[in-house]
Image (cartoon, rainbow, N blue to C red):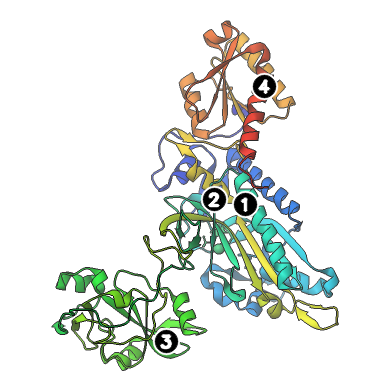
Amino acid sequence: MRWSQTFIPTMKEIPADAEVPSHQLMLRAGLIRQLMAGAYTYLPLGLRVLHKAEAIVREEMDAAGGIEILMPALQPIDLFERTGRKTAFGNVLINFPVRRGDRTLHLALGPTHEEVVTDLVAKHISSYRQLPLTLYQIQTKFRNEERPRFGVLRTSEFLMKDAYSFHTSVESLNDTYQKMYRAYCRIFARCGLDYLPVEAESGPIGGDASHEFMIPAANGEDSVVFCKQTNYAANLERAETGRRTPPLTAPANPAALQKVHTPDVGSIDAVCKLLKCQPQQMLKTLIYLADGQPVAVLIRGDHEANENKIRRALGATSVELADPGTIFKVTGAPVGFAGPVGIKCKVVADHDVPLVKDAITGANEADYHLTGVNIGRDYQLDATHDLRNAAAGDPSPRGEGTLELVKGIEVGHVFKLGTKYAVALDATFDDEKEFRQPIIMGCYGIGVNRIVAGLAETRHDDNGLIWPLAVAPYSVILCPLAVTDDETMRVTNLIYQQLQSAGVDVLLDDRDQRAGVKFKDADLIGIPLRVVIGGKGLKEGVIETKWRWESEARKLPVASAVPAIMELLSARRTEEAATVPT
Ligand code: ATP
Ligand code: MG
């Protein structure tokens, strides 16, 4: 492709509203343009990267036994009503009535396709002989995200690879899950992404039933807990800690219990300011309703409660923060003054709670707190639990090492669904004994745009993007120094044609621009191999090649330039392939 024949609107200035490097660079390098918040046009360079990532995803899905189909984005709302996801998605689900003749249809734009694919399978699969089956598509999804941001990292319309597997047994599901997990590792490695598979919430199947694939990145929206020593990695909602039950008896030399006046001071921060203490000296007392019953949950003041852990520890199906009326009933005080001393409901505590000596808590009385609160004397516990989010420095649940917190971008998700959709949409099979059973399902998503944005976010320098060869919009950029010089253009065109015939993706910067401008743009758009032709070098019979990540160029004789470039590309491809797990 000749630069003058395509559309690469590069920009010198950093766009004002682009906060993160990937967004800035994708705009500046002419990959994307915004139509409105959360909606972007892909320009030729961006589209080429997107297509290359898509091709890798497709190859690996096919190799893992997936069968490609294409389902409609437009879907009848009643499918979502039957699975309860109209309510669950809420405002995120884009749905609307349309008039057709004298009828009104209520339609939705698919945020994912569990409903549509399960409905398809329900109608066409009836016997164990037809299973297992894995269907996938690469298709546009629609989500009315509350806060679309960071360029194409979070948009209201995006390209997803979504796969769905159907099984007669959990063993068969586990087998496909492993294949998909491995395919995901290969996809992200082939795309040149640094990725981390992390344990995620397990949902209905329980156990090791869900993994997210994260790209570690400072601007990531997800928090990942990671232990270098043991390789334990989990998302923040899911991460366990290796903490043990502390002693539940009174500490030595406790301070006296005192009631202090704290008028209108109900938050941890405000109490700390007034009493000149640190949040870790305080105990938060959160009143929840667990399946409708009030429970007080004690958490150290600087920690974050984790509702899933609380729900599991209580063996409840649902937990929610209690209303002010319930809080008044169990504490005798308005919101903000609850504490364990004398509270009138069940109390559960996190492992770190008994370790706080001379704690500060609410006094269960409006405008009062207690200081010098100690376990064994002022309140009692039979046991403690892991009820909070993991924090940096916690021991790893694998027995050795400590946990650290890193930020990540979720680029993919694999999930054992179980029978939720099959039951709701009547997808069943007859087993060997002709008993009808619900089909067991798995689902597997990849954000194709996030592969591109994730690469831009993590592979760049001050001068611009640095694409891996596998997904680069072009492998080689040819920069003739003077397009008005006949000899320069004769050699350039010859190399251009020979590379093209050899199947190399090559971009020829044929603009009549100064070399400095061309080099800046070549760096900005991040083409892996730059080839400079002309000037003194050409008179001496050489051209110059330079990898985007190198600072020194190397000289190649004009006569053998094309085979030498092919050699360089092939060696690089081998290097990139070496990172892909088998
Ligand atoms: P997130 O937590 O980031 O909102 P999600 O958990 O809702 O994502 P899934 O439903 O698991 O996402 O979708 C599968 C994949 O689709 C995600 O791993 C992500 O890569 C991609 N994806 C999800 N939402 C968006 C979006 N708004 N824009 C771009 N990609 C997205
Ligand atoms: Mg997810």
Marks 4 and 3, the one that precedes in the sequence: 3
Front residue of 295 and 7: 295
Marks 1 and 2, the one that precedes in the sequence: 1
Mark 1: few/some/many CA within 10 Å (<14, 14-19, 20+): some
Q: Where residue 300 sits: x, y (%)?
A: 31, 73
Q: Amino acid at mark 2?
A: Tyr
Q: Which mark is residue 185?
A: 1
Residue highlighted by disc 3: 289
Q: Amino acid at mark 3?
A: Leu
Front residue of 26 and 412: 412
At 24% across and 72% down in the image, what residue appears?
A: 281
Q: CA distance from mark 1 to mark 3?
A: 41 Å
Q: CA distance from mark 1 to mark 4?
A: 35 Å
Of the residues tagged 2 and 3, which is closer to the observer?
Answer: 2
Q: Which mark is residue 496?
A: 4
Marks 1 and 4, the one that precedes in the sequence: 1
Q: Where residue 190 sits: x, y (%)?
A: 63, 44
Report whether 188 appears left or right of 277. right
Examine the image and state in which quarter residue 355 appears: bottom left
Q: CA distance from mark 4 to mark 3?
A: 70 Å
Q: Amino acid at mark 1?
A: Cys
Q: Would you say the beta carbon of the disc 4 residue lies within 8 angstroms of ligand 1?
A: no
Location of ligand 2 given as a quarter of the image: bottom right
Q: Which mark is residue 195?
A: 2
Assess whether mark 2 and mark 1 are in contact (beta carbons under 8 angstroms). Answer: yes
Of the residues tagged 1 and 4, which is closer to the observer?
Answer: 1
Report whether 325 appears left or right of 180. left
